[in-house]
Image (cartoon, rainbow, N blue to C red):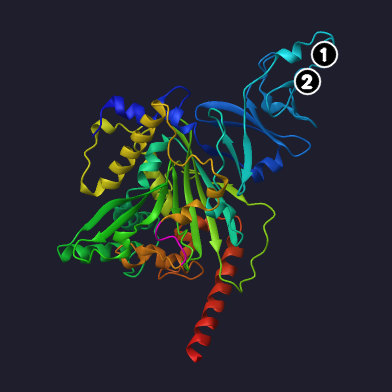
Amino acid sequence: MISQEENELLTRVGPGTPCGELMRRYWHPIYPEALLRENPVRKVRILCEDLTLFRDRTGKLGLIQERCPHRCVSLHLGIPDERGLRCCYHGWLFDAEGRCLDQPLEPPTLELKDKIKIKAYPVQEMGGLIWAYLGPAPVPLLPRWNLFVRPDGFRQILAHQLPCNWLQAMENRGDLGHSVYLHGATFKYARERKGLPHEDPSARYNATNADFDAMRARGAYVKWKPIYNEFGFTKGSMESDKSEDSRSWIIGQNPILFPYLLAFGPQEGDTRIRRLYQIGVPIDDTHTWHLQYCCYVFPEGVDVPKQDAIPYRELPIADERGELIMDYVLAQDMAAWYQQGEIADRTQENLGYSDRLIIAYRQMLRKQIEIVRGGGEPMNVFRDPTKIESPELRIPGNEKGGTAPTRSTVLGRSIRYRDAYHKQGPDGQLYIDEDVDGFCPDRELILELYRQAEKVQAARASGAGAE
């Protein structure tokens, strides 16, 4: 457990708070580009600040304070202009830098507009998301993490608005052990409650527990350790009775990219199709915008259509009766996060050996907070333009020839079934529907691309066998 003072230190993200000042050193996704196409002026909230995002009539993005300094009307009701955004009330015009360019109802000799400047932040577009930087100058470079920019990815964005602090989502990134019960026994019970088949031993939620039970019957347990790198750490794991020369123990898996991004499958040599980021953006102290950024990388020979826009879909966390949704993997994760309360009371927790990676993340977060407090620059602030392209591919094990080390562990079944999303499980359900991916706007197209991939891979295997 930690003290209440430290809990406040690690969780609060408003202006002037230690963690909030750390968070303001990074670029943050603030809005889906697809929705900005539908309406070029949007109200957004990030790091406890209410702001107005807009695209002017020339296509330039702007992010300015929420309210007009004239009569405090919300600027999200504004009108896009060739040079910026006009307030709906009296037509004051502001550009993306926060300068007041026009006050049409004022005498032209008054020159009041030249004395007006409002809060404005830099914004950029990348990977179907609008990104903003709310920190001090000089503005760092926006890192082009691999799945946002790679040319061969077919992307979908699925999101949830969570009524809890960002750290509860982030701590789950280091908690691999929860998969056994939350995505095993709990998943099975959720299906039982809905009257769905749940007894087949080869179904994922049963097989995961069976693998774990077999390990425990040998008297073994899962060992954990953080494997640090320049961007955060990977999660080292192995069964205690196995050799420590395994890739899962030496290079780890699923890198945590500080401050709050979790990467699945960035390895250059990996053959998995489904790769993703999980991103928990701090809206304020008690709300998190959680993004599942899916990037499907199909083998050469699959006819993947070009995407003009990356589709975005926001999903509920409860059904029409107010019951928590628990019948797919990410829903189970999120329920565990927000059911800890708006801000988890960590003074009441009792951590064990299996929580080593949670402790490691808290220590990393605390260290970065102290670096900023001392006037230094925290990790993952990029200044060198030669270092921003797919930086996580520099993590040991993510280079060409790298493979997913989880496949050889007791938790590896989750990767194996995700290789076959287009197939039915023993209960008749498509595997894709056991994950949030089943809600992708382009679900049917993704399934067809998986079928094409299976044919391409089979043809290659057949040709290799004939040689």
Q: Nearer the viewer, residue 216 or 29?
A: 29
| Secondary element type, mark 1 | loop
Q: Which mark is residue 105?
A: 1
As displayed, is residue 78 above or below residue 308?
A: above
Pointer 2 local density, CA inside 10 Å: few below 14, some 14–19, many at least 20 = some
Q: Nearer the viewer, residue 391 or 78?
A: 391
Task: Give the residue furthest to the bottom.
Answer: 466
| Residue under the point 30% across and 24% down | 5
User: Percent position (x, y) of residue 47?
Assistant: 50, 30
Left/right of residue 53 with respect to residue 275 in the rendered view: right
- Decide if residue 230 is in sight here: yes
- Decide if residue 326 is in sight here: no
As displayed, is residue 109 above or below residue 267?
A: above
Q: What's the residue type where badge 1 is placed? A: Leu
User: Percent position (x, y) of residue 461?
Assistant: 50, 83
CB under 8 Å between discs 2 and 1: yes
Q: Is residue 254 magenta?
A: no
User: Percent position (x, y) of residue 250?
Assistant: 30, 60
Question: Which mark sits nearer the N-terminus, 2 or 1?
Answer: 2
For the N terminus, the quadrant is top left
Q: What's the residue type where badge 2 is placed? A: Gly
As displayed, is residue 161 above or below residue 69?
A: below
Q: Which mark is residue 385?
A: none
User: Percent position (x, y) of residue 365?
Assistant: 36, 37
Magenta stretch?
396-400
* Residue to which mark 2 is pinned: 91
Most frequent secondary structure within the magenta stretch: loop
